[in-house]
Amino acid sequence: MSMDMDFPIDLDEVLNIIDTSEVVVVRFSTIGKRLLLDFRTSHSDRPMVKVVRRVRSAEERFRDLKRMRPGLVLPEQIVSFHWPKEVAGLDRMGVLKRIIAKCEASGHAGMESECRKVLVELQGLERAELINAIKGEGYQALWEREPKER
């Protein structure tokens, strides 16, 4: 099953965001969760690649980030972008490769495995959402079939 639509995306801009930003939040069309990429490091903190909940405001995201990364100073900004394609497109279009390269450049081992685990988690959430949509669970029908008379 595929939910990938032919929505245009400025891949160069996405890759530039990955390359130049300290903290990135990726929003998806198909799932409510977000992908948090925190490339900041210290002697005891490695890059963080994590599935996180949706928040109501930028302030709430900063508070969550401070709670998750108490050993690091808050970044000046958190960059966010919308990924209109299916989650697997991150891998297929080279975005995951760029994320892995930036994480590994920090010198912390095991980042590729961690990044791929997060991608699998996101794909599982996306698949579950697709199944819910097909079953109608958590969705309201716009049109319903009239019951057949006997």
Image (cartoon, rainbow, N blue to C red):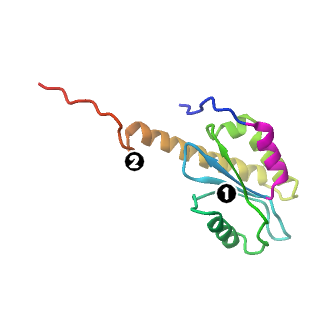
> Chief secondary structure of the magenta span?
helix
Q: Check disc 1 and report its element: helix, strand or loop.
A: strand
Vertical side of 11 occupied by 67: above or below: below
Amino acid type at mark 1: Lys
Could you say where residue 116 lies in the image, as x and y percent from the top left? 70, 47
Q: Disc 1 marks which residue?
A: 50
Asked if residue 102 shows in the view, the reply is: yes
Which residue does the image show at 68% across and 32% down from the upper left? 8
Q: Cα distance, mark 2 to mark 1?
A: 25 Å
Q: Looking at the image, is mark 2 or mark 1 nearer the viewer?
A: 2
Could you say where residue 77 lies in the image, as x and y percent from the top left? 76, 62
- Left or right: where does residue 38 sit relative to residue 54? right
Q: Disc 2 marks which residue?
A: 138
- Left or right: where does residue 144 sit relative to residue 35? left
- Residue 24: image quadrant is bottom right
Neighbour class for label 2 at 10 Å: few (<14), some, many (≥20)? few
Asked if residue 100 shows in the view, the reply is: no
Labels 2 and 1: the sequence-earlier one: 1
- Residue 95: image quadrant is top right
Which residue does the image show at 81% across and 38% down from the upper left? 12
Q: Is 16 a magenta residue? A: yes
Vertical side of 72 occupied by 95: above or below: above
Q: Nearer the viewer, residue 108 or 1?
A: 1
Amino acid type at mark 2: Gly
Could you say where residue 112 lies in the image, as x and y percent from the top left? 77, 49
Vertical side of 42 occupied by 140: above or below: above
Could you say where residue 25 lies in the image, as x and y percent from the top left? 69, 54
Residue segment shown in magenta:
10-22
| Count of marks overlaid on the render | 2
